[in-house]
Image (cartoon, helix red, strand yellow):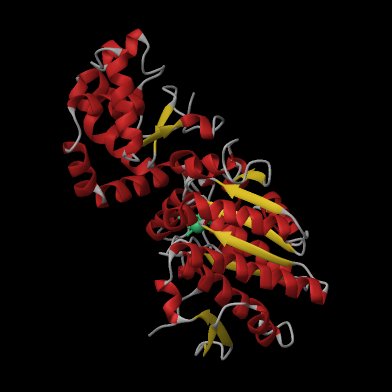
Amino acid sequence: MAKQRRSDRNPFRIHGVASGDAFADRRDEVARLETALTDPGAKLMMYGPRRMGKTSALLRALESVRRDGGHALFADLSTASSAADASNRILGAAGAALGRSLRDFITDLVSKLKLSVSLTADPATGLILPGLDLQARDWDAERQRQTIGDVLDALNAMARKRKICIGIALDEFQEIRRFGGEEIEWQLRGAMQRHHHLAYVLSGSQEHLIERMTASAGAFYKMVDKMRFGPIPPGELAAWIDRRFRASGAESDAGRDIVDMAGPRTRDIMQLARVCHDRKRGAERLGTDDVTDAMREIVAEEHDLYHSVWRGLTALQQNVLRAVAAAASGLTSRDVLRAYALGSSGAVIHAVRALTKAGILQRADAAPDHPRSAPTGYRFDSPFFHAWVWWNTLADLGPAFAERVRENPFTYRTK
Ligand SMILES: Nc1ncnc2c1ncn2[C@@H]1O[C@H](COP(=O)(O)OP(=O)(O)OP(=O)(O)O)[C@@H](O)[C@H]1O
Ligand SMILES: [Mg+2]
């Protein structure tokens, strides 16, 4: 097979986490995470919408902690089905991250644990990794919850003995409630408070759960610093995209259009940039039309799915989506109610709630400065579904709208 030329490779990644030079600068966030992971006793809760790049930033911070000689582990709790599973994740991550860099780490860890653990050789790295005995998954809930505290206590004792700080990054932290209820949160609060040699970064994407945990009746009230993880500033990301195009041999000033059409979610922006790159022929300069064409391609690929979602909605919900896609003012303003046949404002609020619950719409105040913050106060979760609604359903409203769609291919720009 012919070796791929450098310029043939797509520089925009949409699978897995972004790393290496596919990671666009998140200087401030990464610096803050790095500080939190190396500051004994620190507790930082990072939260933000899905696919924004939280895991990528967290892993980037861990890499940099390790490069500077620090100690940190990363455990993803998203798939855990029980507290025992979560303990296993943390134990395994501790073994993998610290087993090589700290002498006798694993034997020491095992001796400090009050639990019985088994050791298994990891075929990929050759490291001997600790895990709870298999029966642990069958223990009662209380005993299982206890295991997480025990594992973290052991890590804290080791960090104290060695006079180091161990950073503990727990990704998709909100999942603990799913298998451990509120009790596990209070138990962890107690454990974390006594760990002066560990530094915690807890990260989550279910914002309402994170908010509940840190509200005044929640287990982590006033115990954690909070860090909201938002979009990469549009100008910075646009410049980064153009640089990436240039480095792969394509002239581009389309970065800003890509960010404006796809934003604010990092994953969507990368997806659009990736298709722009795939479509590019020769070395001509990439511009707005190319971005619109790439958008059309993505939307066409998803047409069947979007069409069936649309057909599953009530007429009022469909009209609300048309209004969010196209309206110039609030959903309950008289003009909008009339132009989009929305009936009463009460009915609209009800429909909006259902669409938000279904993950189709979201409130726009999360990123008020972003061009995608629609004047209605809501925006589509997916820019691609937004574009589908714009291209396929506005003509139903009559020739004036059809004309508008023809004139304005699709943009989130607020003029
Ligand atoms: N800094 C970045 N530079 C370039 N692309 C990024 C960056 N951060 C995220 N991405 C893009 O977003 C995708 C999702 O990133 P990541 O998994 O880190 O997000 P997340 O917020 O943890 O998502 P989830 O809510 O699904 O856990 C990546 O595959 C990549 O395409
Ligand atoms: Mg993630």
The quarter of the rendered structure image containing the N terminus is: bottom left
Residue 271 is situated, as x and y percent measured from the top left of the image, at 42, 54
Q: Nearer the viewer, residue 33 or 340?
A: 33
Residue 112 is situated, as x and y percent measured from the top left of the image, at 68, 79
Residue found at x 31% / y 41%: 385
Residue 11 is situated, as x and y percent measured from the top left of the image, at 51, 63
Q: Nearer the viewer, residue 409 or 397?
A: 397
Q: Nearer the viewer, residue 297 or 406?
A: 297
Q: Is 401 located above or below residue 187 in the figure?
A: above
Q: Is 129 located above or below residue 336 in the figure?
A: below
Q: Determine whether, in the image, residue 97 is placed left or right of residue 261.
A: right
| Residue sitting farthest toward the right | 163
Residue found at x 64% / y 45%: 227
Residue found at x 47% / y 30%: 364
Q: Nearer the viewer, residue 397 or 81?
A: 81
Residue 326 is situated, as x and y percent measured from the top left of the image, at 34, 25
Is residue 137 shown to the viewer in this render?
yes
Count of picture labels: 0
Q: Determine whether, in the image, residue 141 is placed left or right of residue 245.
A: left
Is residue 24 shown to the viewer in this render?
no
Q: Is 235 located above or below residue 37 in the figure?
A: above
